[in-house]
Image (cartoon, coloured by chain):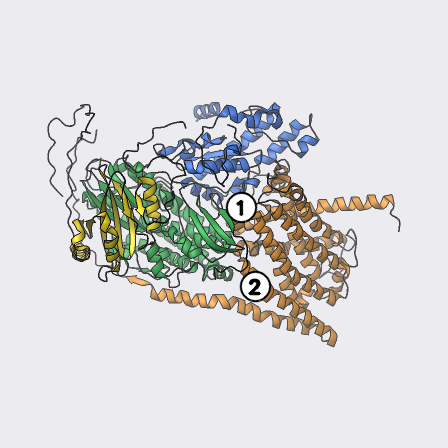
Chain colours: A blue, B orange, C yellow, D green
C-alpha cells in the first residue's frame, strides 16, 4: 500500500492500520521521475517548483546549493511535542538555549514547517496523525527522531501500545539519542541536519560513522 | 493625455524600484522583530546567518520560494491562489503615493489619503477569500474574524485621517507634511494619534489584536493551509502593512521628513522619515512582547465602544476648533482632556478590583504552623530485614 | 511487620518451574499486617454503621478502612456513603480494577473534602462477564475512570451512558490491563 | 455567557488536536461551535497512552521509579516521591530525616519549576510571548541545580525506596539559597508582567468558573480545586515527610475562575521558596538511606498513599503479592481527574476561552494517558 492517504476511513481521523514503513515502497516518494529522478537515493530532495521548472538544466546544480543554503539556515519546526522530550525541545527554543540563533522557529501549521521533531513516545493511536502531519508538510521536509522513544520505543518497548520508533511510520533523517536528549544534543542534531542538507545538494554524503571514529581517535 | 512609451517605461521602473524598496523594508522588519523580541525576552535572536543574523530573512525567503506549493485537494483552487495577490497588491499599491522625502515618491496624488483608505480596505477581501477557499475550519474562522475585526477598525482609522486632513486642509500626503513645519499633529491632536496607533495595531493584526491569525487558537487563521511562495506573499504583505502603519504615523502625525529640522538635504530627510517609521514599528513590536491577546468579543466592544467614539470626539473637537478659530493649544488641551478619562477608566476598571481581590486572597490563605520538631535520633533505622544475600547476586 | 521465616530448603535452586502451577521462587512471601490508626478506627466505625449488613468483609490500614460489598449492593452503599452526614464522602478519589485472575476487584477510594475522612469500597466481580452498576450518577469523576476500566479490563458498567474507548484506539483487540494479556517483546510491526 | 442559540444555524465541529499549539501535547478536543461560542466540548485522550501501569507490573520496585519519572514529566521528583512513599509504607520503612529534608527541598523546587512553566505556557496560550521565556529561564536554573544533585536534568531516578540515592553535594546549602533568591526575582518579574495586566485580567477573570461542589464532584484537586475556595492540600491535611515541621500558607481563591487558579499557583511558588529555606535551616547531617535489601520485596498487602503534586493530588495504590514486582499499581493521575472538569467549565464560553481554560488546568498528557 502506498504512503498516500487512500486507506483512510470516511469519518475524519481514521483507524490506524499497523503497517510497517516499507522503505522500498516509500522510495516512490523520492525516486520517481515525477519527483526529480536524478536525485534518487540521496535523501529528501526538492520537489518540483516554480524556479526549477522555469530554469531547468545547467543552472540547477548551483541553484540547488543556494536553495540548500537557504533551507539549512531556515529550518522551521512543527510545534509538535509528544511527551517528555517535548519539554527539552521547548527548552531549546527558549531563552537560555535560543534556537532562534540558528534561524529555527516553531510554526503551528504543518504547511509552513520544514522539520518535524518527533519529541517523545509514539503510541499506536498517535501513529496515524503523525503520518498525516508528515504528509501535510510540503517538500522538502525532514524528520528528527528525538529521544530513545522516538528512535526505538525506549523504556516502553514492552508496552502493548507503543510504536518501536517513529521510523516505522515516517522516514527519519537524524536520530538524537538520550532520554530525554539534552538541549545541546538536539542542537547537535540540528547542525547535523543542516550539514546533511548542504551536502545532499553538493552530491556528497556525510560518513558519520567514519567521522565519529576519527573524533574518537583524535580525542 | 496620450500615454507615451517612455512614460510606461518610467512608471514600470519606478514601480519595480518601489517593490524592491518595500520588500527590503519588510525583510528588515522581519529581522528587526526577531532581534528586538529576542532582546526583550532575554535571548539574542538570529546570529548564525550573516553578520548579526542579517541574512536570516534572505534565507527564509529563499527557502519559502523553493518550497513545494500545496493547494489542498478540497480547496477552491483559483480563489486559493488569487487570495494572496488580493492581499499583497493593495498593500503594495498604497506605497505609490507615500513620499519618502520631498521629491521621493512615485506619484503625489492629490487624493493620497483617500487613495490609502480605499486600498487598505481591499486587503480584507483577500483574507476572507483565503479563509473560505482553503476549505479548512481554522481558515474560515480566521477569515470571518479578520472580516469583523478589520472592518470595525477601519472606521477609527478613517476618522483620524479625516482629522489630519481637516487640520492640513488637504488630502495630499505632501501637503500634510508641509503643514507640520512647526508643531507635529501628534502634539496638536494626541487623541487622534493614540486612536490611530491602537487602530493601526488592529488593522495589521498585531498583538493584542492578532485574533484572526492567533496561533494558539486558529493556528494561523486564513493562512493555515498555505505553503511555500504563496504563504510568503501573505507574510510579506503583513510586514509591509506593519511598515505602512509606521510610515503613516510618521507622515500624518510626526511630520514626515521635515519636522523638526525643516528643509534638509533629501538623504537626511529620508533618514529622518525612516527613523520615525522604525520607531513606531519598534513600539508595535514592544507591545507584541508585552501583551496577551484579546478575545474576539472584547476586541469588538473595544473597537465599537471605545475607539470609534473617541475618534468621533477627536473629529468633533477639531471641527469646533477650526470653526471658532480657537488657538491651537486649545485643541491639544481638549484632546488630552478627552483622552485621559478613557485611559484612566480602562486601567482602573480591571486592575483595581483585581488588586483588591489579591489582597483579600492573601488574607484568607490558610496558614499552617510548624509543629515542634522532635529531637533527631542519630541512630540508623533498621528496617524490614538485615541485608540479605539471596537477592544481591 | 511479621517475622520473616527462613528459606525452606529446596527453593532458590535452579529447578525448572513446573508447567502447570507457577512455582514461587525466592524468599517466602510475607503478609503485611493491616493495622488501623486512631483516625482510621474512627472512620471504620462510621463506615461499618453506614455499610451495615452489606459488608462482606472489612479491614483497613493506617487511616484508610475498607469494606467489601456485593456488586448488587454497591450503588446503594455508595449513595449512603456520599449522603451520610457523618461520612460525607463527596469525592470519588480513585476508582480502578485489580485483576486477581479468578476474579476482578473494583476498588473505590472515597474522600470527604468537608470532614477530612476517607474510606475504600471494594467489589469482587466474576472474572468472566464482570459487570457492576455505574456510580457516575453520584460522582461525575467516575465517568472517565469507568471508561478507562472498561477499556483496560473489560468491566461493564450498567448505567454509564458512554463507555466508548478512552485510552485505546478503536479496534484494539483485548483488554491489556488483564494479567492474561502478555507483555510485548521487541518487535517490528 | 449563555448556551442559547442566537441564530438558527448548523453547528460546526472544530477538531483541536492532537497536534495543536494550545493543547499542551497530544490532547484532542472536539468543540461544537455556534459561531465563536462553544456549545459542547468532547475531550479525546489516549494519544500518549504508553501502558505505564501495566509496565510497572513487569518491573521490580526499584525500576518502577524510572517509569514514574516519565509519567508526569514536568514534576519528576514529586512523582518519584509519591511512588517511593507508597513502597515504604508497604514495607514499613522509616526514612532517615536528612533524606526526607532532601526529598522535600527537591520536590518543592520541582513544584516551583513546574509552576514557572505553567505561568509561561499559560501566557502563551493567551497570546503573550515573553513570560514563557522567563518561566523557562527559571526552570533552567532549577534544572541546573538538579543536575548538580542528581546528575540528570529531567529523569533523575534520585529518590529511591528508603531514602535518596546519595547525599547532596557540599555546596548544596549556599547554592540553593542563591537559587531561591534568583528564582524569586524571576517569578516576581513574571508576576509584574502578567498578574494585573489589563488584557490578561480581561481574558482570565470570570472565565471557566467552576463552583466548589462541582469541582469536588468531578474530582478536581490541587491548585484547580483551591482556586474554587476549597482549602484542601495533602501537605496540610495528610502531612507527610517533614511537612509538619514547616510553616506555610495554603493560598486559596474564591471565584474558581482561570485567574484564581493562576494566582493560587503564583502564590504557591512563593510559599514553596520559603519552605525550602526553612528546610535548609532545619536540615542536619545524617544518613540518607536506610539499610535494606538491594531488591525491595514488600510484604503481601495493599496500600494507598497520596501526596501533593504541582498539578494536584497524586495517589499510588500498590497491591503487592510479596514478590519483587508490584502485582498491581494504580496511579491516581491528578491531570486526568482535572480534565474531567474541562467540559463543565467550557460550555458556553468562546473558542479563545476554551484554550484559556484548558491551559489553566495545567495538564500533562503523560499523566493523563499514562
Disc on res. B44: 1
From this viewpoint, is residue C98 visible? yes
Placement of the C terminus of chain C among the 4 image quadrants: top left
Foreground of the two, A158 or D347? D347
Q: Quadrant of the N terminus of chain C?
A: top left
- The answer to whether residue D164 of the structure is visible from this angle is no
Q: Position of residue B22 (x, y in %)?
A: 70, 47
- Residue B123 appears at what percent x and percent y? 67, 52
Residue, disc 2? B301
Q: Residue at x 40, y 27 (%)?
A: C188
Q: What's the residue at 51%, 47% (across, down)? A: B43
> Are the residues at dot 1 and dot 2 in contact (C-beta closer than 8 Å)?
no
Mark-to-mark CA distance, 1 and 2: 37 Å
Q: Is residue B140 left or right of residue D113?
A: right
Which sits in the foreground, D304 or A213? D304
Q: Give the chain of mark 1.
A: B
Amino acid at each position: 500500500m502506498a504512503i498516500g492517504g487512500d486507506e483512510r476511513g470516511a469519518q475524519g481521523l481514521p483507524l490506524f492500520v499497523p503497517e510497517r514503513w516499507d522503505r522500498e515502497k516509500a522510495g516512490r516518494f523520492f525516486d520517481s521521475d515525477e519527483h526529480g529522478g536524478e536525485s534518487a537515493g540521496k535523501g529528501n530532495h526538492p520537489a518540483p517548483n516554480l524556479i526549477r521548472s522555469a530554469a531547468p538544466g545547467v543552472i540547477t546544480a548551483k541553484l540547488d546549493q543556494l536553495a540548500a543554503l537557504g533551507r539549512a539556515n531556515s529550518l522551521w519546526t512543527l510545534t509538535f511535542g509528544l511527551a517528555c522530550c517535548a519539554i527539552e525541545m521547548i527548552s531549546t527554543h527558549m531563552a537560555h538555549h535560543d534556537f532562534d540563533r540558528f534561524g529555527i522557529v516553531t510554526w503551528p501549521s504543518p504547511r509552513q514547517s520544514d522539520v518535524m521533531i518527533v519529541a517523545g513516545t509514539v503510541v499506536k493511536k498517535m501513529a496515524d496523525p503523525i503520518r498525516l502531519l508528515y504528509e501535510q508538510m510540503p517538500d522538502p521536509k525532514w524528520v528528527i527522531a528525538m529521544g530513545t522513544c522516538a528512535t526505538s520505543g525506549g523504556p516502553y518497548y514492552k508496552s502493548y501500545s507503543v510504536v518501536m520508533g517513529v521510523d516505522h511510520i515516517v522516514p527519519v533523517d537524524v536520530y538524537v539519542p538520550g532520554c530525554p536528549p539534552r538541549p545541546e544534543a538536539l542542537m547537535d542534531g540540528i547542525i547535523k541536519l543542516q550539514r546533511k542538507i548542504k551536502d545532499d545538494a553538493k552530491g556528497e554524503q556525510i560518513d558519520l560513522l567514519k567521522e565519529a571514529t576519527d573524533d574518537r581517535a583524535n580525542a | 493625455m496620450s500615454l507615451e512609451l517612455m512614460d510606461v517605461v518610467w512608471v514600470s521602473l519606478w514601480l519595480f524600484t518601489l517593490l524592491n524598496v518595500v520588500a527590503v523594508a519588510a525583510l528588515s522588519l522581519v529581522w528587526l522583530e526577531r532581534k528586538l523580541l529576542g532582546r526583550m525576552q532575554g535571548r539574542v535572536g538570529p546570529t548564525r546567518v550573516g553578520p548579526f543574523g542579517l541574512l536570516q530573512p534572505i534565507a527564509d525567503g529563499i527557502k519559502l520560494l523553493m518550497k513545494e506549493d500545496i493547494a489542498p485537494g478540497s480547496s477552491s483552487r483559483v480563489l486559493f491562489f488569487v487570495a494572496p495577490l488580493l492581499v499583497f497588491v493593495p498593500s503594495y499599491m498604497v506605497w505609490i503615493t507615500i513620499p519618502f522625502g520631498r521629491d521621493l515618491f512615485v506619484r503625489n496624488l492629490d487624493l493620497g489619503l483617500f487613495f490609502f483608505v480605499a486600498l487598505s480596505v481591499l486587503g480584507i477581501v483577500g483574507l476572507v477569500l483565503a479563509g473560505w477557499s482553503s476549505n479548512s475550519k481554522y481558515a474560515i474562522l480566521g477569515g470571518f474574524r479578520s472580516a469583523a475585526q478589520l472592518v470595525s477598525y477601519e472606521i477609527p482609522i478613517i476618522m483620524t485621517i479625516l482629522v489630519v486632513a481637516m487640520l492640513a486642509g488637504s488630502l495630499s500626503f505632501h501637503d500634510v507634511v508641509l503643514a507640520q513645519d512647526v508643531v507635529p499633529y501628534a502634539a496638536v491632536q494626541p487623541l487622534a494619534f493614540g486612536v490611530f496607533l491602537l487602530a493601526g495595531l488592529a488593522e495589521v493584526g498585531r498583538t493584542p489584536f492578532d485574533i484572526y491569525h492567533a496561533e494558539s487558537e486558529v493556528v494561523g487563521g486564513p493562512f493555515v493551509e498555505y505553503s511555500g511562495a504563496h504563504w510568503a506573499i501573505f507574510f510579506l504583505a503583513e510586514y509591509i502593512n506593519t511598515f505602512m502603519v509606521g510610515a503613516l504615523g510618521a507622515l500624518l502625525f510626526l511630520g514626515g521628513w521635515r519636522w523638526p529640522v525643516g528643509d534638509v538635504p533629501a538623504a537626511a530627510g529620508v533618514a529622518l522619515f525612516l527613523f520615525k517609521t522604525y520607531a513606531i514599528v519598534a513600539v508595535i513590536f514592544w507591545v507584541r512582547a508585552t501583551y496577551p491577546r484579546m478575545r474576539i468579543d472584547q476586541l469588538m466592544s473595544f473597537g465599537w465602544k471605545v475607539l470609534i467614539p473617541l475618534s468621533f470626539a477627536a473629529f468633533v473637537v477639531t471641527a469646533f476648533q477650526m470653526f471658532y478659530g480657537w488657538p491651537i493649544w486649545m485643541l491639544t488641551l481638549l484632546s488630552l482632556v478627552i483622552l485621559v478619562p478613557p485611559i484612566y477608566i480602562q486601567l482602573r476598571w480591571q486592575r483595581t478590583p483585581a488588586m483588591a481581590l489579591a489582597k483579600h486572597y492573601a488574607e484568607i490563605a490558610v496558614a499552617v504552623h510548624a509543629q515542634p520538631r522532635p529531637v533527631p535520633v542519630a541512630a540508623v533505622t533498621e528496617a524490614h530485614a538485615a541485608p540479605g544475600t539471596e537477592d544481591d547476586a | 511487620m511479621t517475622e520473616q521465616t527462613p528459606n525452606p530448603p529446596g527453593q532458590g535452586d535452579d529447578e525448572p518451574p513446573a508447567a502447570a502451577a507457577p512455582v514461587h521462587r525466592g524468599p517466602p512471601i510475607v503478609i503485611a499486617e493491616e493495622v488501623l490508626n486512631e483516625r482510621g478506627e474512627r472512620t471504620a466505625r462510621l463506615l461499618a454503621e453506614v455499610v451495615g449488613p452489606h459488608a462482606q468483609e472489612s479491614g483497613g490500614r493506617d487511616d484508610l478502612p475498607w469494606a467489601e460489598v456485593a456488586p448488587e449492593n454497591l450503588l446503594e452503599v455508595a449513595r449512603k456513603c456520599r449522603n451520610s452526614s457523618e461520612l460525607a464522602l463527596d469525592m470519588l478519589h480513585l476508582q480502578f480494577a485489580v485483576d486477581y485472575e479468578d476474579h476482578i476487584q473494583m476498588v473505590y477510594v472515597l474522600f470527604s473534602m468537608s470532614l477530612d475522612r476517607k474510606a475504600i469500597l471494594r467489589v469482587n466481580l466474576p472474572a468472566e462477564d464482570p459487570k457492576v452498576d455505574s456510580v457516575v450518577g453520584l460522582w461525575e469523576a467516575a465517568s472517565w475512570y469507568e471508561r478507562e476500566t472498561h477499556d483496560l479490563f473489560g468491566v461493564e458498567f450498567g448505567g454509564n451512558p458512554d463507555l466508548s474507548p478512552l485510552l485505546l484506539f478503536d479496534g484494539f483487540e483485548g483488554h491489556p490491563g488483564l494479567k492474561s494479556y502478555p507483555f510485548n517483546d521487541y518487535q517490528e510491526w | 455567557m449563555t448556551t442559547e442559540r442566537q441564530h438558527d444555524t448548523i453547528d460546526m465541529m472544530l477538531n483541536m488536536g492532537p497536534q495543536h499549539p494550545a493543547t499542551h501535547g497530544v490532547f484532542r478536543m472536539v468543540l461544537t461551535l455556534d459561531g465563536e461560542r462553544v456549545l459542547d466540548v468532547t475531550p479525546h485522550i489516549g494519544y500518549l497512552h504508553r501502558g505505564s501501569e501495566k509496565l510497572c507490573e513487569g518491573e521490580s520496585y526499584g525500576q518502577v521509579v524510572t517509569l514514574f519519572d516519565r509519567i508526569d514529566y514536568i514534576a519528576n521528583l514529586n512523582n518519584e516521591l509519591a511512588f517511593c512513599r507508597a513502597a515504604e509504607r508497604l514495607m514499613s520503612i522509616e526514612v532517615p530525616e536528612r533524606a526526607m529534608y532532601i526529598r522535600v527541598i527537591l520536590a518543592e523546587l520541582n513544584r516551583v519549576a513546574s509552576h514557572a512553566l505553567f505561568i509561561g505556557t499559560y501566557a502563551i496560550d493567551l497570546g503573550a510571548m515573553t513570560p514563557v521565556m522567563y518561566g523557562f529561564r527559571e526552570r533552567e536554573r532549577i534544572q541546573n541545580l538538579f543536575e548538580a544533585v542528581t546528575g540528570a536534568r529531567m529523569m533523575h531516578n534520585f529518590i529511591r525506596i528508603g531514602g535518596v540515592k546519595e547525599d547532596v553535594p557540599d555546596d548544596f546549602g549556599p547554592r540553593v539559597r542563591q537559587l531561591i533568591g534568583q528564582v524569586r526575582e524571576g517569578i516576581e518579574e513574571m508576576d509584574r508582567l502578567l498578574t494585573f495586566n489589563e488584557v490578561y485580567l480581561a481574558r482570565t477573570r470570570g472565565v471557566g468558573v467552576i463552583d466548589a461542589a462541582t469541582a469536588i464532584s468531578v474530582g478536581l484537586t490541587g491548585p484547580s480545586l483551591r482556586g474554587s475556595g476549597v482549602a484542601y492540600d495533602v501537605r496540610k491535611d495528610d502531612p507527610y515527610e517533614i511537612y509538619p515541621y514547616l510553616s506555610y500558607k495554603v493560598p486559596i481563591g474564591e471565584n474558581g475562575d482561570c485567574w484564581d487558579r493562576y494566582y493560587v499557583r503564583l502564590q504557591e511558588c512563593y510559599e514553596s521558596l520559603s519552605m525550602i529555606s526553612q528546610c535548609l535551616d532545619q536540615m542536619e547531617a545524617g544518613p540518607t538511606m536506610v539499610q535494606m535489601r538491594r531488591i525491595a520485596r514488600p510484604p503481601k498487602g495493599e496500600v494507598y498513599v497520596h501526596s501533593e503534586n504541582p498539578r494536584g493530588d497524586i495517589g499510588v495504590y500498590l497491591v503487592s503479592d510479596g514478590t519483587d514486582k508490584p502485582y498491581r499499581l494504580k496511579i491516581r493521575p491528578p491531570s486526568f481527574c482535572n480534565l474531567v472538569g474541562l467540559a463543565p467549565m467550557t460550555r458556553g464560553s468562546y473558542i479563545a476561552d476554551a484554550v484559556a481554560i484548558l491551559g489553566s488546568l495545567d495538564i500533562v498528557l503523560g499523566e493523563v494517558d499514562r
